[in-house]
Each structure stands twice: as structure tokens, then as C-alpha cells.
Amino acid sequence: MGNRCAQLVSSRHWDGVSLGYEDSRGNLEKITNIGGSTHAGDLPKFDPAHMSEALIQFVVTLKVWFIYQLMYPISLFFVKLSVLAFYRRLSPNKTYQRAIWITGGIVTLYTIIMVLLNAFECKNPSDAWNPATWPRGCRDLVPIYYGQAGFNIASDIVILVLPIPTLLKLQINKTKRSAYDPYIAYNCL
């Protein structure tokens, strides 16, 4: 999929379609996602003979998880705003533009709230990776994760449906249409 995205950006550049603000936001999303995960094979295995080593690995795992919880909503934020910024170029219609700004504002507010909720899951943020206090002294994040999933699904549907009326009214030549269609199809994924 990364190669397809690179092809799309380069084809937009070479086809005379200028790269826009949304392209830089998409790149910010990619940067925030680099190294943002740990493979299951890299997680610590419990070995009573090496208890201190296992404890160190457990703390490292908790720290990685804490950072991931912060980076995930930020990464999604850049993706969604990148798509909305692209949509702004489709039509100058004030109602359409207002809908984009409102959607972007809601996504921004949601992201700030989720980052703060995740950052302060414990009264003291460092308790999130302290084996002596975790998970007893921290908030139960399962309901928050379900809320995040629900909001992300709903906002993805809104962002997907938002440009449809405008796209149906667009009267552009086939060259420009061929530049927009793959980008919109990619965003549907």
C-alpha cells in the first residue's frame, strides 16, 4: 500500500496536479506511525530464573504501550485532517466548507480529549509503567477503547460520505478526474 501511495503522490506531481496541504499532513501521519508498535515476539516472556530481567522487560513493554496510546489518536488525527484538507479543494460551496470545518473541529477536539485521557490514565503518568502501581492505581481503559473505536468508525463514515454530493456535481476533465479518483479510493480503505 505504501508503494501505491508513493505512486499516487508522484503521479499527482507529474500530472500537473499540485501537491497540497493534505499531502504534508499525510506525511506527518506516516512519521508519527514509524516505530509505533511492538511485535508479539518482542514482548517479554516470564522466566522465574531471570525475574529482574523479566521485570525490566515488563516496564519497557508498559512504556511502549503508554507511548502507543498517545501516538495512535495523534496518527489518526493527521490521517483524517489530511483527507478533510483534500476535500476542501473540491468545492468552494460555503455549506460544504462549513461541514468540513465542523468535522475537522470535532476530530481535533476528540483527539485532544483522547490524548489527555490516555496520558492521565493514572493520577501520576509515570504510574502507567510502574509495576508496583499498575493497573491498580489507574483508570480502566477498556470502556475508553470501545468509545474510541465507536468514534473512529462513525467519523470515518462521515468523512467518507461527506464529499459524495460534491463529487457527483463536479464537472472536470478526465485527466483531473483520473488524478482524484485513486486518491479518493485510497481514502476509502
Image (cartoon, rainbow, N blue to C red):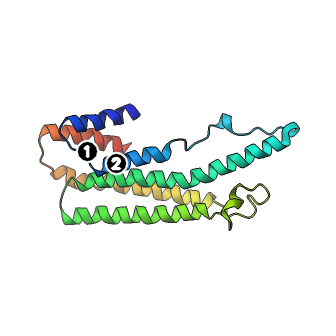
Whole-percent x, y for residue 126 in the image:
69, 60
Residue 125: which quarter of the image?
Answer: bottom right
Image position of 166 with respect to 138: above or below: above
Whole-percent x, y for residue 52 in the image:
83, 44
Res. 18 in view: yes
Left or right position of 110 against 145: left
Disc 1 residue type? Leu
Query: Looking at the image, which residue sits at the far right?
Result: 49
What's the distance in space between the residues labelled 1 and 2, CA to CA? 8 Å
Whole-percent x, y for residue 69 in the image:
58, 54
Left or right position of 87 against 68: left
Residue position marked by numbered label 2 in the rendering: 24
Question: Which one is in front, 182 or 34?
Answer: 34
Residue 135: which quarter of the image?
Answer: bottom right
Disc 2 residue type? Ser
Contact (Cβ within 8 Å) of mark 1 with mark 2: yes
Q: Quadrant of the N terminus?
A: top left
Please report whichever mark, 1 or 2, sits nearer to the chain's N-terminal start.
1
Residue position marked by numbered label 1 in the rendering: 19
Q: Secondary structure at mark 1?
A: loop
The 10 Å Cα crowd at callout 1, few under 14, some 14 to 19, many 20 or more, is: some
